Amino acid sequence: MSERNAGSVSKRQGNPGDNQKRTEAAKSFLASVLCLLGIVVALGAVISIIVASGAFSIVSAGAIGIGLGVAGFFLGANRFGTVTIVVSIAALFFGLAASQGLIPGLDGQDRTLPDQEPAAKSPDSS
C-alpha cells in the first residue's frame, strides 16, 4: 500500500518545472489580454471622436491605454506592450488635435463662439 500511495502522491504534485511553465503561460496570457484591451480602448476613443465629432474623454482613454500597455510590458509582452503604448499615445495626440480644431472635418470643442459676446455692449448704447 505504501508504494501505491507514494506513486499517487508524485503524480498529483507533478514536475516542479510544469508549475513554473503554467505560471509563465498565465503571465503571458494576462499580459496579452491587457495589451489588447489597451489597444481597444485607444482605438475606441479615436472612433468615438470621429463619430461623435468631439473629444470628450480622450485623455482618460489614452491614459488607460498607456497604463494597460505598461502593465502588459512588465508582465512580459514586450513588443505588444510597446505597440499598445505607441497606439495609445497616437490616439491621445489625435484626440487633442481634434479637440483644438486641427483635424479638417472635425470641429474643435472650444472654438465655437457665439456671434456676439453676451456681456459686450455696443458702442451706440453708452
Image (spheres, helix red, strand yellow):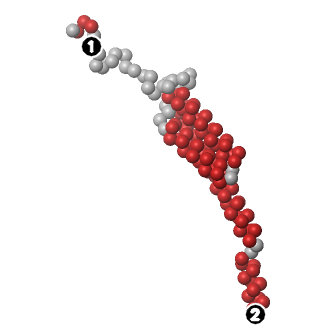
Image x and y of residue 59, in percent: 51, 37
Q: Secondary structure at mark 1?
A: loop
Residue at 56% across / 35% down in the picture? 92
As drawn, is 65 to the left or to the right of 23? left
Query: Hey, which quadrant is residue 27 in on the image?
Result: bottom right
Tell which residue pokes out farthest to the bottom in this image: 1
Residue occupying the point 66% across, 46% down: 81
Q: Residue furthest front?
A: 74
Q: Nearer the viewer, residue 36 or 52?
A: 36
Indicate left or right for 52 with 10 as reference: left
Residue 1 visible (yes or no): yes
- In what element is the residue under mark 2? loop
Note whether residue 51 is visible.
no
In the image, residue 41 sits, relative to residue 14, either above or below, namely above
Mark found first going from the N terminus, 1 or 2:
2
Quickly name the residue at label 2.
1
Estimate the x, y position of residue 17 in percent, counting from the top left.
Answer: 75, 68
Task: Using the image, tell me which numbered label, if any, was put on residue 121.
Answer: 1
* Quarter of the rendering occupied by the N terminus: bottom right
User: Dot 1: few (<14), some (14–19), or many (≥20) neighbours within 10 Å?
Assistant: few
Q: Residue at x 67, y 43 (%)?
A: 82
Q: Identify the amino acid type marked 1.
A: Lys
**Could you tell me which quadrant the C terminus lies in?**
top left
Q: Tell me where residue 80 appears, x and y as whole percent.
A: 68, 46
Find residue 7 and report its image quarter: bottom right
- Residue 14: image quadrant is bottom right
Please state the horizontal and vertical placement of residue 36, each as a whole percent of the image.
64, 47
The amino acid type, in three-letter code, at marker 2 is Met
Q: CA distance from mark 1 to mark 2?
A: 102 Å
Taking the spot 72% from the left edge, 77% from the top edge, the residue there is 13
Q: Is residue 40 above or below residue 20?
A: above
